[in-house]
Image (spheres, helix red, strand yellow):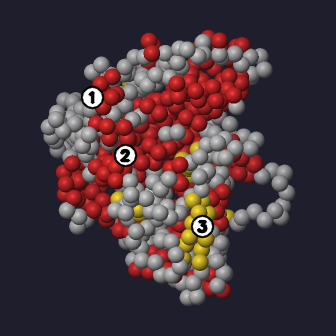
């Protein structure tokens, strides 16, 4: 613990330059890396540091999306004004742009670089430290670094990229921004090189879910291939043969891929992640014996998709429904469905202030509230209240028939359901007790299932709907008529229509018509991951995928004579029409919002002005946010 506190002090007392960790007054670098304990101390510190970036992870991935509205009752006028400016794609003052400060991510990345750089010398010095142990740590930390860069390129597009260790101010080199596609290729190469080489599980369940395992690496690869396929499809690059020249460690590495091939790889690694998770769960239960009252699971006929089963059978008798999935996934944390989640606990004195601070609205509805318009994409009429996710993701406090406005998220902590005399889903009352120490889930089973579904949708394969509806059926409450679905039961009706509920006799559960399989998947993702920091990234991916290829106005930074890339305006407009209209349509600010997006660069964050000032001219502002220099 003393070592961890010391490492934390390095970050807190170091200079404010990005990528800096060590202050010169405390630790002599060459005297530190002596044995495995030193290496593992920095390894764990990287995870702790990532926890400190959680608010950025959440707000960059959600704030600008169609899932939320500003809360006019928020007493914090400064935050409300800032959030309003960000949602409208503008910042009126430099001081407000600290919201976009990325230094915390680069601190995490530098911790990872240090472990990867010093690991071989620790292996040489510490004879108790084995080569197999080092290779597992190397794979784990390589993936953690890749995950942090993945957040950066989804939030900022082009970012500085380095694998070099920074120990002191004199070693800092200021980097220009590396193209998003080049960084993504590099991350994929790194993960391909370490896949299968990390731990499958750890001795404790908390470590198996709180540290990077092979399951997490497969999930990341699935996610990254989905993004690369989308980015290339939107640029009209159906086939590519790239030689990485700007990343020294991979200079000369040839990458050949196609858009369709990347969708296939997304599917492949989603399957590998689900299989690895199934194996991890089975192995963690060895020796437990039988009859321990484990929670029942259903897979709806899908391989390696064992999901916690909620129990609605007693609802008609006046008893409260048993939301096993909610209790295990969110309230308890580190569930069998979890792949990787950031850990918060009283024992570590590390609290999760994002979920208990009212960011998305708790019982006091501060800062933001859930948009009722955004939730209508899956339902019509009373059917919306049959989805038990609404009870903890988008419900008001109290008993009785709740009108779906001014909604709050009760996703983290415990909830109490008040069963009405009517025994009808729409009359459920909910009260909640937010927790300060809930973990934050980065990847879980349903995320990987829907990654696969999205790739299948882009191949126009209706198999995508089997995954969409298996997830939905798990949550669907059909009042007194709900039946128990068997594991082998299909989630597709005889006519090819996907069913929502557990009873083939009840047609209320049929999927609400979507424009395409792709939209159906993204609609389900919106409700499934409400408040989990994913929705805006999903919309960016959609807009990039439909960016218009090499047609239209040239991209201000990517266009070349050899590859005339368009600026993505078509995708932005389609995304706004298809999704944002659910929240902003009819609002006079809607047209202003679309105008401010302009093109793909409006989908990404501005760069913190201090980074530009300190870069010696190597960093340029996002052209859409830089109103003084940008010309469409």
Q: Which of 7 and 206 is in front in this view?
A: 7
Check disc 3 and report the residue beneath it: 415
Rendered view: 71 above or below 344: below
User: At 44% across and 62% down in the image, what residue appears?
Assistant: 365
630 left or right of 304? Answer: left
* Mark 2, secondary structure of its residue: helix
Q: Which residue is drawn at 55% across and 88% down?
A: 422
Residue on which the image places disc 2: 230
Between the C-alphas of marks 2 and 3, the distance is 38 Å
Q: Which of marks 1 and 2 is in front?
A: 1
Above or below residue 563? Residue 79 is: below
Question: Which quadrant holds residue 582?
Answer: bottom left
Q: Can residue 254 be seen in this view?
A: no
How far from the left and from the top, in percent, is residue 58?
Answer: 46, 48
Q: Between tags 1 and 3, which lies in front?
A: 3
Q: Which of marks 2 and 3 is nearer the N terminus?
A: 2
Q: Distance between the residues labelled 1 and 3?
A: 47 Å
Mark nearer the N terminus (1 vs 3): 3
Q: Residue at x 40, y 68 (%)?
A: 406
Q: Is residue 541 above or below residue 423?
A: above
- Residue 357: image location, x then y, percent: 50, 53
* Residue occupying the far bottom of the picture: 422
Tell which of 549 and 393 is nearer to you: 393
**Nearer the observer, disc 2 or disc 3?**
3
**Residue at (33%, 22%) from the top-left corner?**
614
Rendered image: mark on residue 129: none
Is disc 1 placed on a helix, strand or loop? loop
Label 1 crowding class (10 Å Cα cut-off): few <14, some 14-19, many 20+? some
Q: Residue 292: x percent and y percent? A: 81, 62
Q: Do the residues labelled 2 and 3 touch (CB within 8 Å)?
A: no
519 or 142, nearer to the observer: 142
Mark carried by residue 620: 1
């Amino acid at each position: 613990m003393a070592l961890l506190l010391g490492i934390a002090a390095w970050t807190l007392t170091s200079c404010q330059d990005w990528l800096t960790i060590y202050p010169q007054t405390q630790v002599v670098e060459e005297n530190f890396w002596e044995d495995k304990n030193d290496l593992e101390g920095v390894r764990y510190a990287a995870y702790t540091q990532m926890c400190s970036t959680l608010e950025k992870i959440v707000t960059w991935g959600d704030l600008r999306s169609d899932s939320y509205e500003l809360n006019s009752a928020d007493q914090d006028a400064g935050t409300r004004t800032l959030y309003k400016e960000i949602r409208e794609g503008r910042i009126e003052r430099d001081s407000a742009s600290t919201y976009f400060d990325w230094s915390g991510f680069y601190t995490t990345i530098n911790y990872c670089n240090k472990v990867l750089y010093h690991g071989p010398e620790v292996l040489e010095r510490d004879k108790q430290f084995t080569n197999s142990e080092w290779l597992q740590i190397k794979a784990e930390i390589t993936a953690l670094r890749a995950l942090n860069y993945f957040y950066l390129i989804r939030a900022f597009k082009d970012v500085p990229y380095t694998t070099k260790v920074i120990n002191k101010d004199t070693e800092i080199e200021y980097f220009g921004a590396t193209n998003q596609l080049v960084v993504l290729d590099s991350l994929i190469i790194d993960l391909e090189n370490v896949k299968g080489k990390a731990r499958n599980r750890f001795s404790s369940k908390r470590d198996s879910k709180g540290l990077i395992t092979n399951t997490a690496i497969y999930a990341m690869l699935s996610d990254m291939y989905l993004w690369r396929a989308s980015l290339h499809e939107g640029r009209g690059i159906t086939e590519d043969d790239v030689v990485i020249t700007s990343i020294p460690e991979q200079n000369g590495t040839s990458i050949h891929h196609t858009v369709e091939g990347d969708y296939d790889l997304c599917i492949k690694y989603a399957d590998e992640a689900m299989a690895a998770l199934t194996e991890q769960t089975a192995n963690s239960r060895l020796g437990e014996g039988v009859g321990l009252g484990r929670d029942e699971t259903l897979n709806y006929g899908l391989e390696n998709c064992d999901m916690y089963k909620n129990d609605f059978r007693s609802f008609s008798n006046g008893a409260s429904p048993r939301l096993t999935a909610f209790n295990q996934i969110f309230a308890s944390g580190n569930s069998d469905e979890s792949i990787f989640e950031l850990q918060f606990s009283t024992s570590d004195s590390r609290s999760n202030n994002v979920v208990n601070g009212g960011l998305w609205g708790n019982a006091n509805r501060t800062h933001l509230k859930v948009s009722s318009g955004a939730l209508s994409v899956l339902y019509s009429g009373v059917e919306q209240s049959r989805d038990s996710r609404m009870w903890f993701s988008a419900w008001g406090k109290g008993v009785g028939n709740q009108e779906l406005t001014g909604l709050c998220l009760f996703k983290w902590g415990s909830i109490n359901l008040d069963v009405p005399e009517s025994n009808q889903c729409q009359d459920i009352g909910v009260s909640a007790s937010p927790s300060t120490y809930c973990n934050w889930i980065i990847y879980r089973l349903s995320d990987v299932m829907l990654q696969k579904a999205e790739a299948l949708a882009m191949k126009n394969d209706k198999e995508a709907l089997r995954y969409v509806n298996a997830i939905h059926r798990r949550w669907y409450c059909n009042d007194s008529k709900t039946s128990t679905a068997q594991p082998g039961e299909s989630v597709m009706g005889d006519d090819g229509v996907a069913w929502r509920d557990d009873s083939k006799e009840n047609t209320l559960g049929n999927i609400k018509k979507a424009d395409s399989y792709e939209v159906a998947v993204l609609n389900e993702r919106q409700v499934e991951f409400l408040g989990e920091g994913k929705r805006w990234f999903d919309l960016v991916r959609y807009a990039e995928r439909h960016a218009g290829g090499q047609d239209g106005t040239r991209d201000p930074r990517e266009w070349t004579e050899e590859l005339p890339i368009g600026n993505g305006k078509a995708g932005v407009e389609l995304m706004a029409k298809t999704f944002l209209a659910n929240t902003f349509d009819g609002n006079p600010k809607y047209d202003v919002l679309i105008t401010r997006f302009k093109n793909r660069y409006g989908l990404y964050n501005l760069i913190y002005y201090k980074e530009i000032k300190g870069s010696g001219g190597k960093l340029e502002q996002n052209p859409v946010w830089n109103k003084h220099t940008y010309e469409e």
